[in-house]
Image (cartoon, rainbow, N blue to C red):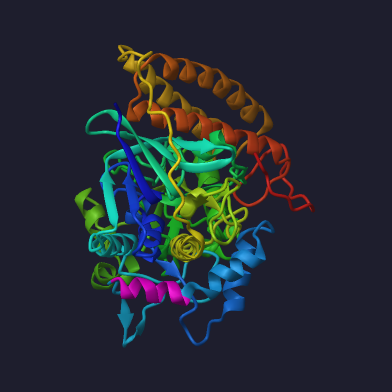
Amino acid sequence: MSKQHQFDVLIIGTGSAGLMSALQLSKNLSIALIAKDQLLEGSSFYAQGGISAVLDAHDNFDAHVADTLSAACGLADKKAVSFMVENAPAAIASLEESGVNFTRSNQDYHLTTEGGHTHRRVAHVADKTGQSIQVNLLDNVKQYENITLFEEYIAIDLLIQKNQCHGAYILNKHTHQVESFVAHKTILATGGASKIYRYTSNPDTSTGDGIAMAKRAGCNIVNMEFAQFHPTCLYHPHAKSFLISEAIRGEGGQLHLENGEKFMHKYDGRGELAPRDIVARAIDSEMKSGGFDCVYLDISFKGKDWIKKHFPTIYAKCKDFGIDISKQSIPVVPAAHYTCGGINTDLNGKTDLTNLYAIGEVAHTGVHGANRMASNSLLECIVFAKSCARDINHQISNSNYIEFEPWDASRVEPSKEKVVITHLWDEVRSIMWNFVGIVRSDRRLNYANHRLEQIETEVNEYYSLYLISSDLIELRNLVKTAQIIIQSALFRDESRGLHFNEDHPSQSKNTKNTII
């Protein structure tokens, strides 16, 4: 008989959004906090750059809102953007209360700038902001007896009854048994989906789990065609998913070809500080037209002492691979980085299903539109985690828990064909990179859509025959989310922000969200 747990609130995901929501919820509530891998493993931990907020006397909310709306290419919700921006200073204060020590200069915040910002407004902890946030939030979470941590548990599907969510079926990766987590409220904080692409800055956990589960449960998924490619991932055969922070370009870093030729001026007057979609397409264009494996990013002119002070993590990591960035340029390539679309929510994280919330990268709050402005991501996590928790605190009831049938594995058997999962996983990621990447076309999208339909049939057949495993769960979610991205891209017959289609190179006058 499989275990059944009962909690007031089930939070799936232990990134900055999941941890902050747990801390903001009432201490009178019982909370289950689910980590699909190790507790600190996830995109939040690897976020280097920082968190944007108006903290300087020469900056203002209107400018932060305007910059965000500009980067979003007409698709952001101004009300949601204003809500996030106006709550940004309080988000910084909450993090400081949790122990995050932001880098300062003469008692003031040391603020940097990144692509799309017209002011210095990115607060940071050297170049490991996400790590500092994660470690401190987790340390705080562990102090509360009402919060129970479940490490290496991966969610399978939501428990749905009459258009209401009552928790989830979750696989215990230690025992290989499926357990029922029944809850009055469920928060999806599962992160993004960039592991769908062959080259990504994301850790292995970013497989679109929350998006796929929500879609299967009946939620609307919005604007998934807008997959952000970070322009600069370290290009090295052994440097798996290592990001070279945008803050390096914010501090004057220059992109060039192997022969030293600079090229960003040909694509945008803002040069290296153009929004990420423009920089990524420029690099992609130079690599394809010149047949290059990578381009180069130079910050060596700042000097060794300055570099080691401002970018200690990047300096050390590159040095490990034999690259001294105080003397050499950094070889870089674009890589899938951030999912701008997601589960449709309101300002409190509420989804289309009663009792189900979504926060962080898995959610579509309306703040990113067609392109996320740098360092608004951690901000979104903290601001909407707090509003979500406030909403739950004000309206949770002490009603009885719904009874659900335990997971039935009596009609399936252990798989002897695990190579199928590995093969299909690789094929999905290759299809997405080659046909649904930085530059797209109708023909490539239709091919990808047709092949993903076939793969979905194969995966569903495999799912119905064999015992569940974490790899199979992720593959099933990977396929579902990839299909949503492709269908969203086919729906948008224009080029806007992160979505560039060679067959529709112009931007339409009509601003519309894509709802799948």
**294 and 444: which one is in front?**
444
Is residue 233 among what the camera can see? no
Q: Is residue 270 above or below residue 119?
A: above
Q: Residue at x 52, y 49 (%)?
A: 355
Residue that appears at 58% across and 61% down: 347
Q: Residue at x 26, y 65 (%)?
A: 140
Is-magenta flag for residue 97?
A: yes
The N terminus sits in image quarter: top left
385 or 3, which lies in front?
Answer: 3
| Region of the chain picked out in magenta, as a range | 89-98
- Please give left or right for residue 497 compared with residue 117 in the image: right
- Magenta highlight on residue 236: no
Q: Nearer the viewer, residue 357 or 444?
A: 357
Q: Position of residue 385 (x, y in %)?
A: 45, 61
How many numbered markers are drawn?
0
Q: In this rendering, would 406 be left or right of 132? A: right
Residue 124 in picture, x, y percent from top left: 36, 70
Residue 401: give x, y in percent of width and height. 43, 44
